[in-house]
Amino acid sequence: MGLHLSQIDEADVLLTNDPLALLIGMVLDQQIPLERAFAAPHELTRRLGQPLDAEELAKHDPDAFGAIFSQPPALHRFPGSMAKRVQAMCQIIVDAYDGDAARVWTTAADGKELLKRVAALPGFGTQKAKIFVALLGKQLGVTPPGWREACAPFGDEGSFRSIADIIDVSTRDQVREYKKQMKAAAKAGSA
């Protein structure tokens, strides 16, 4: 089973098989449609003309990297700031995980440590970190002890709260409907 976040076969294969691509997609998953965010690592690979490599991306000239993100169509609504965020994340992966993005989760002792590691990456607040841990557990078999508790409520089985629950177009639509209901409830509560 592979991921189906971008809804583009080649991009989803990359997300499934390349931990750095998945992390980059997650960083970009804000203020743009999720399909666009998760298709961006595939497009970035195409623009670079080579596979994604944390060390290469971290040391890439920041202005040139920003230009790659800005090239039409831009990889994100805010290409410059997102290019910087991706480079900062890659630098942490180089410094803390020997350039191997998968080590963020493969070497975590438990769910609590995994959540802490993910939350320490640029662009990952508490909620986004929980969603990413849930995605790892539900779809990629990364299930250190306590992972569901660490990412609650996103790790709940049978829920449709986040990208962790998207396995096809139907579940994507269910997640979108859930988010729409939550926004409406929040708006009604603040009125």
Image (cartoon, helix red, strand yellow):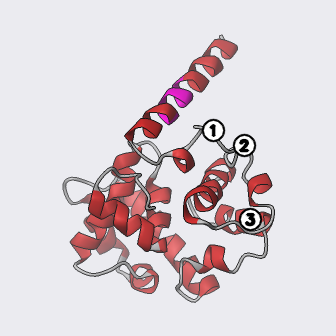
In depth, the one of 136 and 187 nearer the eye is 136
What type is the residue that disc 2 sits on?
Pro
- Residue lying furthest left in this view? 72
In the displayed structure, 152 sits above or below 81; it is above
Question: What numbered label is drawn on residue 116?
Answer: 3
Whole-Å distance between the Cαs marked 3 and 2? 16 Å
Q: Which residue range is magenta in the image?
A: 175-180
In the image, is 105 to the left or to the right of 29? right
**Disc number lying in front (3 or 2):** 2
x 21%, y 53%: residue: 73
Q: Is residue 97 magenta?
A: no
In the displayed structure, 114 sits above or below 125; it is below
Circle 2 crowding by C-alpha within 10 Å: few under 14, some 14–19, many from 20: some
x 35%, y 66%: residue: 13
Quick check: marks 3 and 2 in contact, CB under 8 Å?
A: no
Circle 1 crowding by C-alpha within 10 Å: few under 14, some 14–19, many from 20: some
What type is the residue that disc 3 sits on?
Lys
Question: What numbered label is drawn on residue 159?
Answer: 1
Quick check: marks 2 and 1 in contact, CB under 8 Å?
A: yes
- Magenta portion: prevailing SS class: helix
**Disc number lying in front (3 or 1):** 1
Q: Quick one: SS at disc 2?
A: loop
Q: Quick one: SS at disc 1?
A: loop
* The quarter of the displayed image where residue 72 is located: bottom left
In the displayed structure, 86 sits above or below 158; it is below
